């Protein structure tokens, strides 16, 4: 059954997109809009910063600091 027939016969049950998802198609699941991308990757950035700090502490403790 085509999508047009499904809509015509009330067999289509998909919900419409709401909020920013309705406005911008890049703002959907795994999307590439800046806001969603930052929210999704925030934990990775925090982990990278923590690893850099730990590495710097280790270098200072061993006397290998630049």
Image: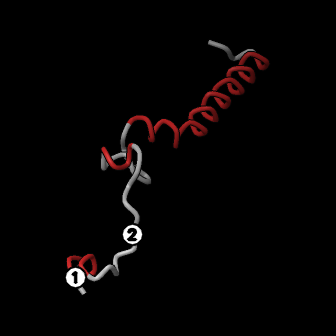
Residue under the point 58% across and 39% down: 44
Task: Identify whether 33 is placed above or below 56.
Answer: below
**12 relative position to 51: left or right:** left
Q: Position of residue 34 (x, y in %)?
A: 39, 35
Residue 55 position by quadrant: top right
Residue under the point 48% across and 36% down: 38
Residue topped by disc 1: 5
Task: Give the camera-side residue of 23 and 56.
Answer: 23
Q: Measure how far apart labels 2 and 1 are at the Cα level.
A: 14 Å
Residue under the point 34% across and 49% down: 22
Whether pointer 2 and pointer 1 mark residues with C-beta atoms closer than 8 Å, the reply is no
**17 relative position to 44: left or right:** left
Q: Position of residue 63 (x, y in %)?
A: 74, 15
Residue 15 position by quadrant: bottom left
Q: Position of residue 12 (x, y in %)?
A: 34, 76
- The kind of secondary structure element at disc 1 is helix
Q: Residues within 10 Å of mark 1 (few under 14, many from 20)?
A: few
Q: How is the image coloured?
A: secondary structure
Residue under the point 30% across and 50% down: 25
Task: Give the camera-side residue of 35 and 49.
Answer: 35
Residue topped by disc 2: 14
Q: Position of residue 19 (x, y in %)?
A: 41, 45
């Amino acid at each position: 059954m085509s999508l047009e027939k499904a809509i015509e016969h009330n067999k289509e049950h998909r919900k419409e997109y709401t909020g920013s998802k309705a406005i911008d198609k890049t703002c959907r699941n795994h999307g590439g809009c800046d806001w969603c991308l930052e929210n999704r990757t925030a934990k990775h950035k925090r982990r990278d910063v923590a690893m850099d700090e730990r590495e710097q502490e280790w270098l200072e403790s061993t006397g290998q600091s630049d």
